[in-house]
């Protein structure tokens, strides 16, 4: 007898919950990857999810049957309108939760991503509305990522990498895209390089050398690779 028929009610509900979470995780991953390049290849999806390509392909085929994605072999994956709507809903939950965990519960910005990854799948729409209202309907999460509005729209910032700011330039930290790297976030917080911080670039060493900067008037030296991970808005 197939395993699905031997599960008791509690086990079945647990399986359904895990299945629902996997679906949401995949559409969110596809949406994120599509912001860089679309259609999204199955190999990129597999790498982002940390699974084998065959496993990713199997899940993508399931998503296609649910009409959440369009999938053609050797072409790639795109989200359908329904899939995009679901992805944005999950992203809204995630980013609202990150901010709520910081503002209301005192979590650090390097702790909230992992917690939000769990909670984003279980909060109700009513709780989401209450959280948004309690936070005065925020536009950005703690890492500077835009929070989708109820209609799916998001604020768009004109940003550039800190590594591209010329000596003598001034910029304000806008976003740290890699919000899942807790070690990186702790290090940046120690340097004061958090969204809203004012940065003066005083010198840039040649041959991909480090940047000498002042963060809210505190002198710092950071590597070029690190500066590439920090998105800023130029201040003129």
Image (cartoon, rainbow, N blue to C red):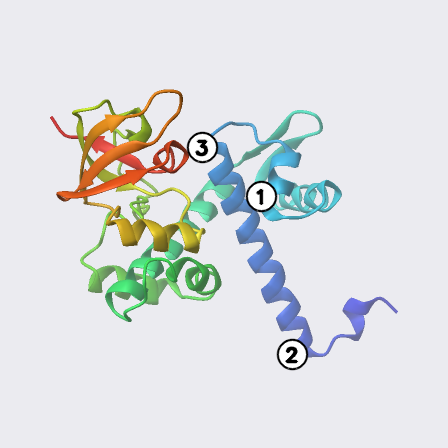
Residue 178 in the figure: left or right of residue 148: right
Q: Position of residue 23 (x, y in %)?
A: 58, 52
Mark nearer the N terminus (3 vs 1) = 3
Q: Residues within 10 Å of mark 1 (few under 14, many from 20)?
A: some
Mark 3 and mark 1 in contact? Answer it, CB < 8 Å: no
Q: Quick one: SS at disc 1? A: helix
Q: Residues within 10 Å of mark 2 (few under 14, many from 20)?
A: few
Q: Residue at x 46, y 46 (%)?
A: 87
Q: Is residue 81 visible?
A: no
Q: Residue at x 28, y 39 (%)?
A: 221
Q: Residues within 10 Å of mark 3 (few under 14, many from 20)?
A: few
Q: Quadrant of the C terminus?
A: top left
Number of dots carrying numbers: 3
User: Does 152 appear above or below 104?
Assistant: above
Q: Is residue 127 visible?
A: yes
Dot label at residue 128 = none
Residue 202 in the figure: left or right of residue 123: left
The residue to which callout 2 is attached is 10
Residue 87 in the figure: left or right of residue 107: right
Q: Residue at x 81, y 68 (%)?
A: 3
The residue to which callout 1 is attached is 48
User: Does 101 appear above or below 161?
Assistant: below
Residue at the right extreme of this rendering:
1
The residue to which callout 3 is attached is 35
- Give the mark toward the camera: 3 or 1: 1
Mark 2 and mark 3 in contact? Answer it, CB < 8 Å: no
User: Does 7 appear above or below 49?
Assistant: below
- Give the mark toward the camera: 1 or 2: 1
Q: Quick one: SS at disc 3? A: loop
Residue 229, quarter of picture: top left
């Amino acid at each position: 007898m197939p395993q699905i028929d031997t599960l008791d009610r509690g086990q079945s509900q647990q399986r359904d919950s895990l299945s629902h979470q996997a679906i949401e995780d995949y559409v969110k991953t596809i949406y994120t990857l599509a912001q860089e390049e679309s259609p999204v290849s199955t190999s990129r999806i597999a790498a982002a999810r940390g699974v084998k390509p065959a496993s990713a392909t199997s899940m993508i085929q399931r998503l296609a049957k649910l009409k959440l994605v369009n999938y053609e072999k050797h072409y790639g994956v795109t989200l359908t309108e329904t899939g995009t709507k679901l992805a944005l809903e999950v992203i809204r939950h995630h980013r609202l939760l990150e901010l709520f965990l910081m503002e209301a519960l005192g979590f650090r910005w390097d702790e909230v991503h992992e917690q939000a990854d769990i909670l984003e799948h279980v909060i109700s729409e009513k709780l989401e509305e209450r959280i948004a209202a309690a936070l005065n309907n925020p536009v950005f999460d703690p890492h500077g990522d835009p929070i989708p509005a109820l209609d799916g729209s998001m604020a768009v910032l004109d940003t550039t990498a800190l590594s591209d700011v010329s000596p003598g330039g001034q910029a304000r930290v806008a976003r740290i895209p890699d919000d899942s790297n807790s070690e990186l976030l702790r290090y940046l917080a120690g340097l004061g390089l958090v969204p809203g911080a004012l940065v003066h670039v005083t010198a840039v060493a040649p041959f991909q050398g480090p940047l000498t900067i002042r963060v809210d008037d505190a002198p710092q030296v950071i590597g070029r690779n690190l500066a590439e991970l920090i998105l800023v808005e130029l201040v003129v």
